[in-house]
Image: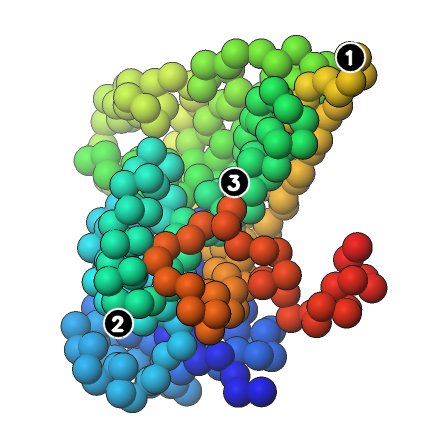
Amino acid sequence: MEKIRVMIVGYGNVGRGVVESIKRNPDMVLAGIVSRSPERVKKTVTDVPVLPVNEPDVWMKELRPDVAILCGGSKDDLPKQGPEFARYVNTVDSFDNHSRIPEYFHAMDEAAQKAGHTAVISTGWDPGIFSLQRAIAGAFIPGAHAYGFYGLGPKGGLSMGHSDALRTIPGVKDARQFTHAIPEAIDKIRNGENPVFEPGDMHTRECFVVLEEGADKEAITKTILEMPGYFAPYKTTVNFISQEELDAKYKGFPHDGIVLAAGVTGNGNTALSEYRCQWGSNPEATANVLVAHARAVVRLAREGKSGAFTILDIPASYFSLMTKEELLAHCM
Ligand SMILES: NC(=O)c1ccc[n+]([C@@H]2O[C@H](COP(=O)([O-])OP(=O)(O)OC[C@H]3O[C@@H](n4cnc5c(N)ncnc54)[C@H](OP(=O)(O)O)[C@@H]3O)[C@@H](O)[C@H]2O)c1
């Protein structure tokens, strides 16, 4: 069986994770990487071609990809790159701006349908496998509301978006933000209360900030605590530390989370479903989910299915390397 040829678009944390993940999936081969900064990528990647992103004729001919895994940022890269790449090749991406997913889906669906390609959007762990858990929890426990919590362990979970937000503040040299779930809020759900939460009722936020020389601690603390959307609705603590301490104690991209849904069945029997993920590296975990979706995309495309899909539209067997008989024997 010929291997699935994967092209990586954009080489950051998730892109690096995809390179590693492909090595663990024997039906895949890394055809090459395309990037806006190929010279930067070539400094560390020497075993596959690295090509400029704006030369589709070159990379389509040289790399002959079956699927492109789009690893650019959700804020500025994917809304532009997604529809552009769907014109040339089947795609998978992890677009995670939740409120804009419907809009992004329709843009990708139109571009992919027009070109006769297949695109899976917004997959990873959230959106991605947690979306699936939310959908099936609501279907299997009718009327149940699904809740997502992040950062259950003592260290909490590193939020890359909130860390980026801290780094945009003038005077901040570097920063990490850890999200902590509030255990009492989880208990309320487990008790079947189906509570209505404000964002600040579910999580607290812990910031570790390295200052530029001469920066005003008090002004920066105030800016953080009052930042709308990101920190203002939450109980937030701000710790100022040195770069050495930040690098030594808070390295890597750990994250974890849980989707819970509680309700009743029959005549009032309680029902609770919980699905938990714990990742030593959020981008590597996301990359593994993307690579399994690359397999599914190629299968959908070979069946002649074009347009945009999400994890909710794809049979789980399409992600797996197991045969139908193996799935029946081992997973049922
Ligand atoms: N759904 C989920 O569960 C989930 C989970 C985690 C992340 N995500 C999404 O994945 C996206 C990518 O995350 P990431 O951590 O990989 O972002 P990142 O490291 O910032 O990389 C994003 C892009 O920036 C460019 N880049 C990276 N490092 C660079 C550098 N040193 N200098 C210049 N350009 C550089 C790369 O594009 P070029 O190579 O083209 O320059 C890369 O594709 C995030 O925006 C997030 O939305 C989703």
Q: Amino acid at mark 1?
A: Gly
Q: Amino acid at mark 2?
A: Tyr
The percent position of residue 324, horizontal first and vertical second, equals 71, 68
Please name which of the two marks, 2 or 3, marks the residue nearer to the observer.
Answer: 2
Q: Secondary structure at mark 3?
A: helix
| Residue that label 3 marks | 131
- In contact (CB < 8 Å): disc 2 and disc 1: no
Looking at the rendering, which quadrant does residue 108 occupy?
Answer: bottom left
Residue 197 appears left or right of 242 = right
| Residue that label 1 marks | 268
Q: Secondary structure at mark 2?
A: loop
Looking at the rendering, which quadrant does residue 281 occupy?
Answer: bottom right
Count the marks.
3
The percent position of residue 68, horizontal first and vertical second, equals 36, 69
Q: Amino acid at mark 3?
A: Ser
**At 19% across and 35% down in the image, what residue appears?**
170
Mark nearer the N terminus (2 vs 3): 2
Please name which of the two marks, 3 or 1, marks the residue nearer to the observer.
Answer: 1
**At 19% across and 82% down in the image, what residue appears?**
57
| Residue that label 2 marks | 88
Disc 3/disc 1 C-alpha distance (Å): 27 Å
Q: Is residue 295 above or below residue 258?
A: below
Disc 2/disc 1 C-alpha distance (Å): 53 Å
Q: Secondary structure at mark 1?
A: loop
Report the quarter where the C terminus lies.
bottom right
